[in-house]
């Protein structure tokens, strides 16, 4: 065991917080079996206590310690996608703490696909409750520096695993309702799930999942107002901003179209995985410039872009607000 992992396990056992990398985003972890440790996550994030957390497991063999029912699809999904960016919502065992589940009868479980996360989980040999390691309503962190920016010294240990390879949060699939329901799109898409399920999962109407904080409109938001625009709309909005003498930031999959002192242009990859990988780090960097607005060139519609468009829509809905709804 490396000294860092040893220290992380010791902290978790003492009921302290440890931030760690996953393949999606960094998590702010606590011993999921220790309600007062879990309470520290909510305090650090400023997150309402009725928002449930994902419990991260070292392997699918741990499922039955947390879930009282595992429907037929569970095993095949776990075999196909774990370790990996898929969270399964299952009926919880009675001893799972309300602090983790937000008092719901279900629990969110996943085995993350990051070597450092797995090393930590295997050494800890238990469940680690971890939301994304950001203050409530803010952009999820994809590097250890982002986590330090969010919490300063408040988190005793941040394990540094470099930049997260996926860059957006896991796909959440609810298996507790009799039929699989997609609660949050992610890099594992409906077609990937359908290959294992034999059918495309249903999609939850927003109103159906009020306690899934990732489903609140104003989430993952920068402080700078953010507008989603078409490629034509981008040039129009840029011209207007420059006429008004405003500083603007642009996030677009195309090369810089305007060179101007007032314009900062960040080009991101033009395919979904690359766009997702760069999205949060780019938004954070642009947010720090103090521009009047961030203009994001909207990617195409279509399933390949589902998760990226979902996060962009939420970022636009919540941007520039001090708090989320
Ligand atoms: O990729 C991820 O999922 C990252 C990494 C750290 O694993 N975690 C993450 O956690 O995004 P968080 O807390 O920021 O988002 C987890 C989402 C929330 O929207 C939460 O409401 C939902 O999972 N969730 C957790 N348990 C649930 C449950 N029992 N029923 C419905 N939604 C649940
Ligand atoms: Mg989050």
Image (tube, rainbow, N blue to C red):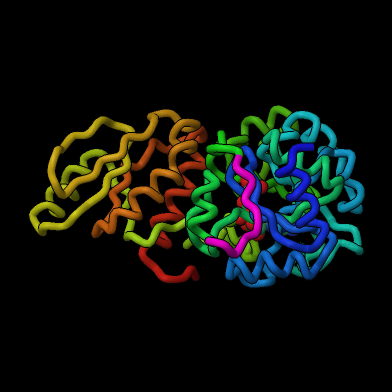
User: Residue at 32% across / 46% down in the picture?
Assistant: 296
223 or 254, nearer to the observer? 223
In this view, the residue in front, 222 or 90, is: 222
Instruction: Name which quarter of the figure residue 156 lies in.
Output: bottom right
Tell me if residue 211 is in the magenta stretch. no
Look at the image and tell me whether residue 208 can be seen: no
Q: Which residues are magenta?
A: 151-160
Quadrant hosting residue 281: top left
Q: Residue furthest left?
A: 243
Viewer-proximal residue among 78 and 158:
158
Give left or right: position of 319 versus 259. right
Q: Quadrant of residue 190?
A: top right
- Where is residue 189? Give x, y as percent: 60, 35
Asked if 287 appears above or below 322 in the picture, the reply is above
Q: Residue at x 39, y 36 (%)?
A: 300
Up-down: is 194 above or below 62? above
Q: Position of residue 265 (x, y in %)?
A: 25, 40
On the picture, is 202 further left or further right than 297?
right
Image coords of residue 136 (percent x, y): 55, 64
Residue lying farthest to the front in this orientation? 3
Rendered-image quadrant of the N terminus: top right
């Amino acid at each position: 065991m490396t000294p860092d992992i040893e220290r992380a396990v010791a902290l978790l056992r003492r009921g302290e917080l440890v931030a760690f990398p996953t393949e999606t985003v960094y998590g702010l972890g606590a011993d999921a079996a220790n309600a007062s440790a879990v309470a520290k996550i909510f305090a650090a994030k400023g997150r309402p206590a009725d928002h449930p957390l994902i419990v991260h497991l070292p392997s699918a063999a741990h499922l039955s310690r947390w879930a009282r029912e595992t429907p037929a699809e569970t095993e095949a999904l776990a075999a196909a996608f774990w370790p990996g960016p898929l969270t399964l919502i299952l009926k919880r065992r009675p001893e799972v703490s309300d602090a983790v589940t937000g008092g719901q009868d279900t629990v969110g479980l996943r085995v993350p696909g990051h070597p450092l996360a797995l090393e930590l989980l295997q050494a800890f040999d238990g469940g680690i409750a971890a939301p994304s390691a950001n203050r409530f309503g803010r952009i999820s962190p994809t590097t250890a520096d982002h986590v330090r920016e969010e919490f300063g010294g408040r988190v005793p240990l941040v394990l540094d695993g470099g930049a997260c390879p996926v860059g957006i949060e896991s796909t959440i699939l609810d298996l507790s309702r009799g039929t699989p329901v997609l609660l949050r799109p992610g890099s594992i898409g409906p077609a990937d799930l359908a290959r294992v399920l034999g059918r495309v999962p249903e999609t939850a109407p927003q109103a159906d999942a009020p306690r899934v904080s990732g489903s609140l409109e104003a989430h993952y938001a920068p402080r700078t107002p953010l507008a989603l625009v078409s490629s034509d709309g981008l040039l129009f909005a840029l011209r207007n901003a420059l006429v008004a003498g405003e500083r603007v930031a642009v996030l677009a999959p195309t090369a810089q179209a305007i060179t101007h002192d007032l314009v900062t242009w960040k080009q991101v990859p033009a395919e979904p995985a690359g766009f997702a990988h760069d999205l949060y780090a780019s938004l954070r960097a642009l947010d720090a410039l103090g521009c009047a607005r961030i203009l994001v060139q909207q990617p195409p519609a279509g399933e390949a872009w589902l998760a990226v468009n979902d996060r962009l829509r939420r970022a636009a809905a919540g941007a520039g607000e001090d708090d989320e709804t």
